[in-house]
Image (tube, rainbow, N blue to C red):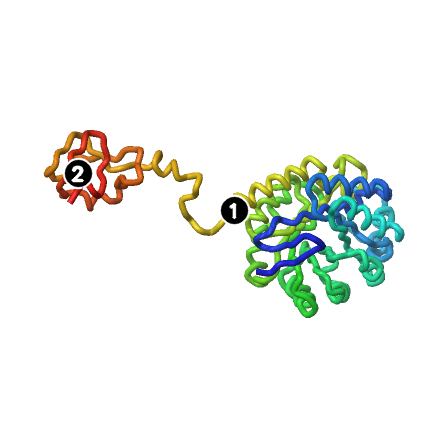
Amino acid sequence: MKEIQIENKIIGKDRPTYFIADIAANHDGNIERAKELIYLCAEAGADAAKFQHFTADTIVSDQGFKSLVGDQSHQSKWKKSVFDVYQDASINEGWTSILKETCDKAGITFLTSPYSYELVDEVDDFLSAYKIGSGDITWLGIVEYIASKGKPVLLATGASTLEEVDIAMSTLLHRTDDIVLMQCNTNYTASLENFKYINLNVLKEYSRRYPNTILGLSDHTPGHATVLGAVTLGARVIEKHFTDYTTREGPDHKFSMDFNTWKEMVDRTRELEISLGLETKKVEDNELETVVLQRRAIRVKKDLMIGDSVSEEDLEFLRPCPKDALPPYELEKVIGKKLVENIKSGDYIKWISIK
C-alpha cells in the first residue's frame, strides 16, 4: 500500500492519522501570534502547522468582488472588503523562514499553500510538501507547477465535480504519485446544517478510482464527528483550522478549533485507530475468560448413570461453558448416545462422556 513521507512522519493506511492545523489567517497579521499558535497546535497534537502564502492581488480581484451580486456566503459578514481582508491576512515576505524555524523548534512540519507561481518558488526551499486549496483545483497551471517540484502534494476537492477532480488528479499523476486526495466542503459558515453536505462516502469513490492514493479530509464543521467518520473510511490525513479563541475577530476564527477541541479530536482519533484493529475475526486474548463465563454448555437436568441413553428431555443449556464442555450446536450429536460415565444433575456433558 502507498506510503508518503513528510519530514520524519510516514503517512499510509497502517500509519497514525496525520493532523494538519491550518492556522491560515488566524495569525491576525502578527508574527509573534503566528509563532504562539505553532507551539500551541503542536502541544495539542498537530503534526504540521499550515499557512497560506498570498498577496491580495494574487488571489482576488478587488473590482470583481465589488461588482459581484449575491453568492457571498460567509464573506457577506466581513466588515471590510474581500480585497482588504485578504490583504490583512497575507503573510509578510520575511515571515517564511521564521515560521519554518518555529515549526522546527516545536517539532512539527511547516506547510503552506502558495497562491502564485512566484510564491511557489519563494517557499519551495522551506517545504517538504505542498497543499493545494480547493479554490485552485481548476487552475491546472499551478497544479502542474507545484507537482513539478517533486514533493508530496495534498489536494483539497471542495466545491468540485468528480470530473474536475479527475482532471486535477490526472495533471498531478503525470508528475508524481505522492498525492493525498482530500474530500472537502468549502462552506465556512460553521453552521450545523453543513454536516449533511460533507459526504464522507465520497472517500469510497476516491478509493475505488485511485486505490494507490492516500485519502484525507479537509474539514470546517464543528467538533470531530466528521474526522472519526473519515478515518473509519480510510482517511489518513486530517486538516482543520486552528486558533486559540474562536471568538476573536477575523475571517477564519469562527469555524476553527481551539486547543481543547483539537486535543480532544486527536485523542479520540488515536482511540479509534486502536479500535479499528484487524479484519480477521477471532476470539481475542481479553475474551478468553468470557468464552467460558458467558457461553452455554449442554448440561443434564437430573442424575444420569452409565449406560443411560441421552434424550433431549434430559438436557438444558446453561452457563458456564468450560473448555471441554459441548456447546448447544452439538446437540444433535449427543441425542441417543449412551453414557460411559455417571453425570450429576447440573453437570455438563463432554465428548468422553458418551459413545
Res 188 quadrant in image: top right
Res 339 quadrant in image: top left
Residue occupied by mark 2? 312
Q: Return the residue nearer the eye: 210 or 347.
A: 347
Q: Disc 1 residue type? A: Leu
Residue occupied by mark 1? 276
SS at mark 1 in the image: helix
| 184 displayed left or right of 323 | right
- For marks 2 and 1, the one nearer the N-term is 1
| 330 displayed left or right of 151 | left
**Residue at horizontal 19 percent and vertical 40 percent from the top:** 353
Q: Disc 2 residue type? A: Glu
SS at mark 2 in the image: helix
| Residue 218 in picture, x, y percent from top left | 67, 50
Mark 2–mark 1 distance (CA, rounded to whole Å): 42 Å
**Residue at horizontal 73 percent and vertical 57 percent from the top:** 129
Q: Return the residue nearer the eye: 345 or 191.
A: 345
Residue 299 badge: none
| Residue 272 in picture, x, y percent from top left | 56, 43
